[in-house]
Image: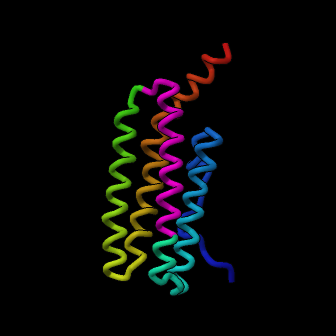
Amino acid sequence: MLPPLFIKWQNKNNTGIQLIDEQHRGIVSIVNSFYYLAEKGMCNDALFLSITKTLKSYSLIHFIVEERILKATEYPDLAKHIETHRKLSLETKRIEYEAIRDNDPMLLLKFLKKWWIEHINGEDMDYVPHLRMYEENRQI
């Protein structure tokens, strides 16, 4: 039997911005790999730290790219969006510490699943109309 996915990517998760969608799917892929290893009991301390380091690094790259796109297109709610990213990073560190302390990777996994899906389908979808309008105006 093939392993189940922790987060199933759905069409509703697509922003329509190819680079952003690709990065979102990459983050979800890391979370799904983390889940698989945790479910199999293979997530020792070293692997846990390696996965969370990869996730943090890739998320940072994503945040920088997304924020630069929004800045270049003069997104009016950029400061709010940047603050959301900052809060996610801080909360992730806090939950990661608790998960390591309690030897419970599911603490972090549940948080990541909830946050990423809500962020992608909430805050990220808020900027989609702005970016589409920007693209349309550039074509004229």
Q: Nearer the viewer, residue 20 or 96?
A: 96
Q: Position of residue 85 (x, y in %)?
A: 39, 47
In-image side of 90 versus 124 (left or right): left
Residue at 60% x, 75% y: name it.
4
- Is 138 located above or below residue 30 in the figure? above
Dominant secondary structure of the residues highlighted in magenta in the image: helix
Residues in magenta, as a range = 51-75
Single out the residue that lies furthest toward the top.
Answer: 140
Q: Quadrant of residue 97?
A: bottom left
How many numbered discs?
0
Q: Position of residue 134 (x, y in %)?
A: 56, 22
- Is 120 located above or below residue 82 in the figure? below
Question: Dividing the image into 4 quarters, which one contains the C terminus?
Answer: top right
Single out the residue that lies furthest toward the bottom.
Answer: 41
In-image side of 5 versus 60 (left or right): right
Residue at 52% x, 26% y: name it.
72
Q: Is residue 70 magenta?
A: yes
Q: Position of residue 54 (x, y in %)?
A: 53, 63
Residue at 48% x, 51% y: name it.
60
Q: Position of residue 118 (x, y in %)?
A: 43, 52
Residue at 53% x, 33% y: name it.
69
Q: Is residue 5 magenta?
A: no
Q: Quadrant of residue 1?
A: bottom right
Q: How are the residues colored?
A: rainbow
- Is 7 located above or below residue 42 in the figure? above
